[in-house]
Amino acid sequence: MDSGVQFSKEQGPSTPTQIARMKGVPYSEAIGSILWPVMVSRPDAAFAVSTLSQFIQNPGPAHWEGVKRVISYLLTTKDHWLTWGGRGKTIVEAYCDADWGEKLDRHSVSGYSFHMGQGAVTWSSKKQHISALSSTEAEYIAQTHTAKEALWIRTFIGEFCQGFSSDPIPINCDNQSAIALAKDNKFHARTKHIDIRYHFIREAVEDRKIELKYIPTDDNVADTFTKALAKGKFRLFAGLLGLREA
């Protein structure tokens, strides 16, 4: 996606001419066709598809151009496959991130990816349902979504990998305030408005089921799930996700 473009509902057709023009555009079919590779093997396009799929009910020309851009990208990179292998620091490692209020509707986007070795095995790019009042809150919510996936992966792998369930899954995050909030409640006075359902991550940390670690933003591969990035950084993170040319 072009990092300088913002999509919104206001870009939908509003005049009879615009409505007639968009009536014959197979927008929902196109979204369905690019959703499948994103779910299976193309995490690099997850943010773009997640964003554009929000306008299926009333897409406009700008949305359609965005979809065509994604299709063109997937076509020109069809020889890039998601590969696994190599030795990582741990059996499983996660990255999580969130933007804060960058979208026109002021809803932040959560993103995460889980890696086994040097390739991503599961990922997500999803708009948060609430309006976060700070970057700390947005990142904290993203950490919570990541923790839920981590607990499932921890149980799943523990069923066939003896001893794995005794080790916490490291989750890399680039917001130190959100990490501190998850480890204890010293920020409670300023964060008591946060829904209690997001605080279960503290129990997961205390029980050593997950371990939160700080990572600089430039090294946080989950950044590609929360916003459109410049070409150089986008390609770097696509490689870190495990996408290689066949």
Image (cartoon, helix red, strand yellow):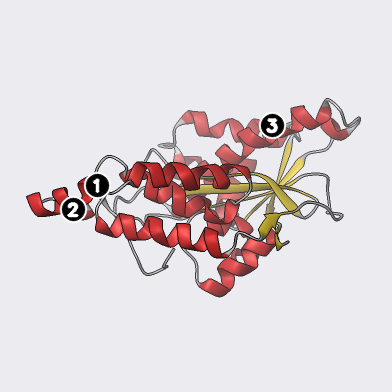
Find the residue positioned furthest to the bottom.
232
Distance from the alpha carbon under mark 1 to that under mark 3: 45 Å
Q: Secondary structure at mark 1?
A: loop
Q: Quick check: can you spot residue 187? A: no
Q: Quick check: can you spot residue 239? A: yes
- The correct choice, above or below, for 29 with respect to 158 in the image is below
Horizontal placement of 170 versus 198: left or right? right
Q: Secondary structure at mark 2?
A: helix
Find the residue positioned furthest to the top.
159
Mark 3 residue type: Leu
Q: Residues within 10 Å of mark 2 (few under 14, many from 20)?
A: few
Q: Residue at x 49, y 44 (%)?
A: 35
Q: Residue at x 57, y 74 (%)?
A: 232
Q: Which residue is the site of mark 3?
A: 151
Find the residue positioned furthest to the front.
24
Q: Nearer the viewer, residue 143 or 16?
A: 16
Residue 204: quadrant of the picture:
top right
Mark 2 residue type: Arg
Mark 1 residue type: Gly
Q: Residues within 10 Å of mark 3 (few under 14, many from 20)?
A: some
Q: Looking at the image, tell me whether mark 3 or mark 2 is earlier in sequence order.
A: 2
Q: Position of residue 146 (x, y in %)?
A: 60, 41
Residue 24, numbered circle: 1
Q: Nearer the viewer, residue 199 or 24?
A: 24
Q: Which residue is the site of mark 2?
A: 21
Q: Nearer the viewer, residue 182 or 215?
A: 215
Q: Are marks 1 and 2 in contact (CB under 8 Å)?
A: yes
Q: Nearer the viewer, mark 3 or mark 2?
A: 2
Q: Residue at x 42, y 68 (%)?
A: 3
Q: Residues within 10 Å of mark 1 (few under 14, many from 20)?
A: few
Distance from the alpha carbon under mark 1 to that under mark 2: 7 Å
